[in-house]
Image (spheres, helix red, strand yellow):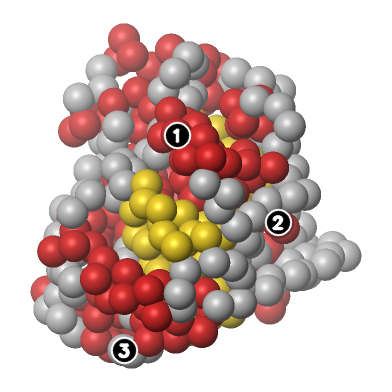
Amino acid sequence: MKDFEFYNPTRIIFGQNSETNLLYEIRKYGKRILMVYGGGSIKKSGLYEVVSQQIREANALCFELAGVQPNPRLSLVRRGIEMARKNNVDFILAVGGGSVIDTAKAIAAGIVYDGDIADLLMTGGTVTKALPIGVVLTIPAAGSESSSGTVITDDEKTGLKRSFGGEALIPEFAIMNPLRTYSLPKYQTACGCSDIIAHLLERYFTTVTDVELTDRLIEGCIKTVLNNAPIALKKPMDYASRSEIMWTGTIAHNNLLNTGRVGDWASHNIEHELSGFNDVAHGAGLAIIFPAWMKFTHTRDMDRFVQLAVRVFDIDPTDKPKEQIIHELIETFENFLTSMGLPIRLREINIKEQDLPSLARKAMVGRTQVGQFVPLDEKQILEILTLAL
């Protein structure tokens, strides 16, 4: 196990009436609020009015930035920065899922950043200053409600999807009511579950030894999603399964499971080029890339793959060579993804063989390697994409 520091100050307010706490949290951070959200879903569900009423009761002035899309755009971030500066905003409130939260984080950083926010994206810079951020979570997936990072697509010049982070971007609080996830479409629920599992697997595949505690925590989290995703998809208003998924999504990405180990993150970095290319949902792209990455890298540490197969996916290892166990692991994982209605091949999202070299090349822009478990170059990324075709 490696030496580590763990810091996560986000106050988690979880439960059926958690929105009623928003009033008290808002009062701690300012009187001029920029509320960031997506489309009409929070208005249809009634959440918009609930949040607005809490802001009014706090005697705060609210400015609104709507229109956040999946794979959030740099152009909207710039608009938010301009709006926040013009109105002397002192607090950012994100009402939505990961794309909304990431947009809010980028705005919070950009307001106090002296340079061009696009430079932070391309360099993966570390943020040391930002306005305080609060979250009302509606989609369990990205884990951005208590993480230190943000991912934004440059829709102005490069088309690249890149990230930056820092402790200043960790939200002050996250209000999490599983009831607010009941109306999510099945596909969005499935994409969220895929994203959560991917966050866990990125951490699981490490070259660091003697990490039994975090291994077992990660395994338990993956198992929780595997158990509860089918229930939530079959019974969308099942509070128990929705709660398990929502809380697992937060734990998967709040850095607790990073402690003492180094994760991989190749699959995320490769997938970002898919969503930058044709705007595929992030969780759907990960459902395609992660199994292909596993096929390509499994010989690096076959014992770790076997451990995952046996402990999490219930593969019987009796009298089987490691290669067969790993084959069954990947096949079982792919079957789970397809059972949720997700794609597992690039051709299912209209990406063709001739598109692959460009995707591999873009994944390497500004980088010398992708991934830590098996450091990848452009040629190897192309091989993974070919396996995913």
Relative placement, left or right, of 265 versus 277 is right
Tell me: residue 48, above or below residue 375: below
Residue bearing mark 1: 79
Which numbered disc, 3 or 2, marks the residue that appears first in the sequence? 3
Mark 1 residue type: Arg
Q: Position of residue 208 (x, y in %)?
A: 76, 58
The amino acid marked with disc number 3 is Gln
> Looking at the image, is mark 1 or mark 3 earlier in the sequence?
3
Instruction: Report which residue position mark 3 lands on.
Output: 16
Which element carries disc 1, helix, strand or loop?
Answer: helix
**Disc 2 versus disc 1: nearer the observer:** 1
Q: Nearer the viewer, mark 1 or mark 3?
A: 1
* Circle 2 crowding by C-alpha within 10 Å: few under 14, some 14–19, many from 20: many
The residue under label 2 is 168
Give amino acid for label 2: Ala
Q: Of all residues shown, which one is farthest toward the right?
A: 3
Rounded to the nearest angstrom, the CA distance separating label 2 from label 1 is 21 Å
Q: Is residue 246 above or below residue 264?
A: below
- Closest to the observer: 285 or 47? 47
